[in-house]
């Protein structure tokens, strides 16, 4: 006996599941054209609403997009505490004394 044809959104969802199982996608911008190309290759007609319904149906139960793990956060040592104006003036005097002493030699 002949089985009734699957409804279009379910047929599209099945094709999308097969595509997602065979290929990894980093974003929906990568997934949509590949899905459309697969449907064109199979000569499956669809409306935009059916296309969107199929994506929503599959996305509700399966992971379509492979997100990379977050990058490791680089830990830097803490900044040294800021110096006071007086400490900065003292350091500048020391540098001047060393430079002046080097010029006289």
Image (spheres, grey):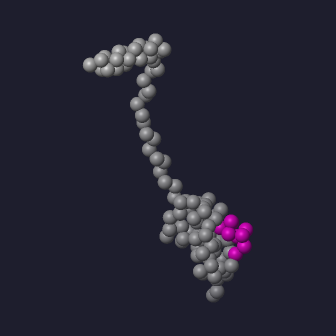
**Horizontal side, residue 30 vs residue 4: left or right:** left
The quarter of the picture where residue 42 lies is bottom right
Residue 31 can be seen, yes or no = yes
Residue 98 seen in this snapshot: no
Q: Is residue 32 magenta?
A: no
Magenta region includes residue 48:
yes
Residue depicted at x 50% and y 68%: 23
Overall secondary structure of the magenta stretch? helix
User: Along the line of sight, which residue is nearer the eye, 59 or 89?
Assistant: 89
Q: Which residues are magenta?
A: 46-54
75 versus 70 height, above or below: above
Query: Where, quadrant-wise, is the C terminus in this rendering?
Result: top left
Q: Which residue extends farthest left?
A: 105
Name of the residue lying farthest toward the front: 104
Dividing the image into 4 quarters, which one contains the N terminus?
bottom right
> In screen coordinates, is 9 left or right of 25?
right
Which of the 4 image quarters holds residue 16? Answer: bottom right
Q: x, y (%) of residue 59?
A: 61, 61
User: Percent from the top left, x then y, of residue 2?
Assistant: 64, 86
* Among the 4 quarters of the image, the one containing residue 55: bottom right
Choose between 84 and 74: the one closer to the eye: 84
Residue shown at the point (51%, 58%) measured from the top left: 66
Residue 87 sits above or below residue 33 on the image: above
- Residue 32 spot, x, y in % from top left: 62, 67
């Amino acid at each position: 006996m002949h089985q009734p044809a699957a409804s279009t959104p379910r047929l599209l969802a099945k094709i999308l599941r097969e595509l997602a199982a065979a290929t990894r996608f980093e974003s929906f911008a990568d997934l949509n054209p590949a899905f459309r190309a697969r449907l064109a290759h199979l000569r499956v007609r669809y409306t935009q609403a059916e296309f969107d319904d199929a994506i929503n149906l599959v996305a509700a139960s399966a992971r379509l997009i492979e997100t990379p793990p977050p990058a490791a956060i680089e830990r830097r040592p803490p900044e040294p505490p800021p110096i006071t104006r007086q400490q900065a003036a003292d350091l500048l005097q020391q540098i001047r004394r060393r430079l002046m002493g080097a010029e006289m030699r």
